[in-house]
Image (spheres, rainbow, N blue to C red):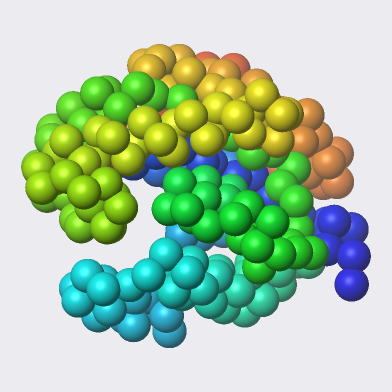
Amino acid sequence: MDHNAFRGHLIVAEGTDGSGKSTAMSLLDSWLTAQGIPVYRTAWNSSSFIKPIMRHVKKKEWLSPAAFSLLHASDFYDRYHRLILPRLEAGYVVLADRWVYTAWVRDTVRGLDLPWVQSLYQGVREPDLAIYFSAPPDVAISRIKHAARELKYYESGQDISGLHDRWASFLWFQEKMRQAYLALADQGILQLFDATLSITDQQKVLRQWLRPILESYWQQSDFFQAPADDTTSSITSIKKGDF
């Protein structure tokens, strides 16, 4: 099956926790829906079958890097075959909050070999656009604290950092991942995006990037209307925890 021959389009957002990618994808979802374009959003570690298992074992704090990697791969493939590919085949724009690059980055930072990690996702559909939301770790920390949520053990990288302070471990872990993401951007695998821009400016840039990809929708039917350039009218209020 040629996954890249599907009529739909796959847009991927990558970045460290607190980079603002989830907020940006939510706003793009609203914008595309307003144009009459069918949209489906999916997020990393969100399978209704695998996520409960993941939540349970994470509480034990004994997962090895390889076991951690395989559980996330199981979650990915459940969503990929059951939810994502059928929608791409049906012509949807799929907005993915993280893709295989999250595994490449997180798992190699945890000491696994990149070729082994990549082999888990061999043959997976390549995105039409893969964006890396670049934000310094201190900015990410500020956003997470503003959202008033607590950091978790694996999110902070405490399984590998050896640091007892969760925020210090998070800063160390996020910087390691940021460098790995930047390396992928240098290779042209990810499109580097300044995630420190204001939300309005972010949307202006992202919508410009999406326009060439979405031309096929606006040419197919009079029902799809190419949107105006104004972004402020379609950006709604952002809730405290959206980042």
The spot of residue 47 in percent (x, y) is 45, 74
Q: Answer above or below: position of 172 versus 158.
A: above
Q: Residue at x 37, y 70 (%)?
A: 64
Q: Between residues 232 and 80, which one lies in front from this camera angle?
A: 80
Q: Residue at x 85, y 56 (%)?
A: 4
Numbered marks: total: 0
Asked which quadrant contains residue 211, the reply is top right
Asked which quadrant contains residue 216, the reply is top right
Q: Answer above or below: position of 146 versus 150.
A: above
The spot of residue 165 in percent (x, y) is 9, 43
Q: Between residues 42 and 121, which one lies in front from this camera angle?
A: 121
- The quadrant of the picture occupied by the N terminus is bottom right
The spot of residue 36 in percent (x, y) is 63, 48
The spot of residue 73 in percent (x, y) is 55, 70
- Tell whether 118 sits left or right of 138: right
- Tell whether 173 sits left or right of 233: left
- The quadrant of the picture occupied by the C terminus is top left
Can residue 78 be seen in this snapshot? yes
Q: Residue at x 34, y 82 (%)?
A: 53
- Tell whether 99 sits left or right of 224: left
Asked which quadrant contains residue 123, the reply is bottom right
Q: Answer above or below: position of 58 versus 145.
A: below
Q: Between residues 173 and 41, which one lies in front from this camera angle?
A: 173
Q: Between residues 199 and 76, which one lies in front from this camera angle?
A: 76
Q: Answer above or below: position of 82 versus 213.
A: below
Can residue 231 be seen in this snapshot? no
